[in-house]
Image (cartoon, rainbow, N blue to C red):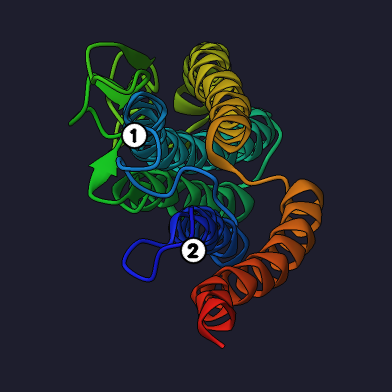
Amino acid sequence: MLSVNTNNGAMAALQFLTKTQSELQTTQSHINSGLKVANAKDNGAVFAIAQTMRGNIAGYTAVSDSLNRGMSTVDVAISAGQSISDLLNDLKGKSLAAADASLDTASRNALNADFSALRDQIGTIVQNAGFNGVNLVDGSTANYQALASSDGTKKITAQGQTLALSGSIVTLTSTGTISTQAKASTMVATINASIGNVNSSLAKLASGSKKFQIQGEFVQKLVDTLNSGIGNLVDADMATESAKLQSLQVKQQLGVQALSIANQAPSITLSLFR
């Protein structure tokens, strides 16, 4: 039927052209953003899953920061402990030298002066072994905890050590001297015990640092896996989108031509009245 009021062909062509235009806009959006699911309207279920995973990543980023701070804190404590261990070795050498009964007074006094300076240096090291307000060798922190899970319920602990003078680990007192042969002989045993205690404390600190390191490496791998998973869910396949774009552009051109042809149909009616 020929009608000038209703053009079914044009309406059908317009419907297909409108659909092509919509698909073309969607494809262009995918290409522009690089995402096939950029918002909830694209795919509500996938977007919700991706957002949950993004939240987990944000949590693990905080965990990673906490673990890095923990490693730095423990590493500073380990450096302090190693320095104290080295000082104790030097103090042992001074004590042994001063314990020699044949040593003259002037030499023993010189050794004692060096001994006192090295002894006091232990206190200085302990006082300055803090990181981010936390000191693991002065006795102020019994245990240091870092985050281990994105919900904050799991934590990793490093045990603090008290390496100050006159403690249970460094038994050398802040007034200890080697001013006499007898005091020097006694001091050798005291320092030997302190060296063993400090080395044991270093092993505990190193164990704590290792725990932080292992967990940090795991968290980084987990974040990488989550990022990859999100990409699989929401990233656009640019090769596919490029091919689809070209196809839709051709369909758009054909749709315009089809609509143009359909719009010319009513003019055929004029030939009936000639």
Identity of the residue drawn at 43% across and 44% down: 119
Residue sitting at the far left: 140
Which one is in front, 150 or 129? 150
Task: Quote the CA–CA distance across marks 1 and 2.
Answer: 44 Å
Dividing the picture into quarters, in which one does residue 97 lie?
Answer: top right
Give x and y (percent) for residue 73: 40, 40
Q: Amino acid at mark 2?
A: Ala
Please name the amino acid that badge 1 sits on. Answer: Gln
From the image, tell me which residue sits under label 2: 10
Q: Is residue 226 left or right of residue 11?
A: right
Q: Residue at x 36, y 28 (%)?
A: 56
Q: Which residue is mark 1?
A: 51
Question: Is the residue marked by circle 2 packed among few (<14), some (14-19), or many (20+) residues within 10 Å?
Answer: some
Q: Nearer the viewer, residue 130 or 123?
A: 130
Location of residue 246 with respect to 121 vertically, above or below: below
Viewer-proximal residue among 166 and 157: 157
Q: Position of residue 15 (x, y in %)?
A: 45, 54
Q: Is residue 131 left or right of residue 20?
A: left
Sequence-earlier tag: 1 or 2? 2
What SS does tag 1 mark? helix
Q: Quadrant of residue 221?
A: top right
